[in-house]
Amino acid sequence: MSSALHWFLGLASVLVVVLVGLESSWRALLNRPPGAVAARLTGIVLLLLGLTAAGGLGMLIAGKHPQNKLHFMYALLAFAAVPTANILGSHGPPRRCALLTVVGALFGLAVIVRLFKTG
């Protein structure tokens, strides 16, 4: 049961990270600064990844270990990808901020896919 919930939360994280990438791509095209939607999506990404990590820690305590120890490092990278990109672009022009967020979302997506592969 807990592994199914962990998998579902990981999949939900993928979907929201894709939404972050799409929203920031749209902002880059329109040259607009981040607004309330961008902030909410970032918060949802952090919430989902935090819940997924908490579930994973629960599984670890219960004795179910990931196949690869790099799973823990990938989880930290996934958690930091979008907020770090937002911070890096926060003091520049809107287009650069949006493009950095796109790069952060793509990096986060790649790391989350890698997390699915490490099991």
Image (tube, grey):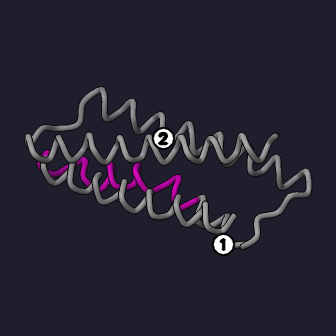
**Residue 60 point in image, percent of width and height:** 83, 55
Q: Secondary structure at mark 1?
A: helix
Residue located farthest toward the right when viewing the structure as drawn: 63
Q: Amino acid at mark 2?
A: Val
Q: Residues within 10 Å of mark 1 (few under 14, many from 20)?
A: few
| Three-letter code for the amino acid on which mark 1 is drawn | Leu
Whether pointer 1 and pointer 2 mark residues with C-beta atoms closer than 8 Å, the reply is no
Q: Is residue 49 left or right of residue 21?
A: right
The relative height of residue 65 versus residue 24 in the rendered view (above or below) is below
Q: Is residue 112 above or below residue 3?
A: below
Q: Which residue is mark 1?
A: 70
Residue positioned most to the top: 36
**Magenta-span inclusion, residue 108:** no
Q: Position of residue 111 (x, y in %)?
A: 50, 63
Q: Which residue is rendered at x = 58% and y = 59% of the image?
A: 76
Residue bounds of the magenta highlight? 76-94
Residue 45 badge: 2
Spot the residue most to the left.
30
Whichever of callouts 1 and 2 sits on the residue coming sooner in the sequence is: 2
Whether residue 112 sits left or right of residue 7 in the image: it is left
Separation (CA) of disc 1 from disc 2: 21 Å
The residue under the point 76% across, 65% down is: 66
Based on the displayed image, in which of its 4 quarters is residue 26 positioned?
top left
Q: Residue at the location (40% across, 62% down)?
A: 107
Residue 80 lies in the magenta stretch: yes
Q: Residue at x 73, y 44 (%)?
A: 4
Q: Position of residue 21 (x, y in %)?
A: 31, 48
Give the position of the C terminus as an image quadrant.
bottom right
Q: Residue 10, how many percent across, how many down? A: 59, 47
From the viewer's side, name the closer residue of 54 and 84.
Answer: 54
Q: Main secondary structure of the magenta part?
A: helix
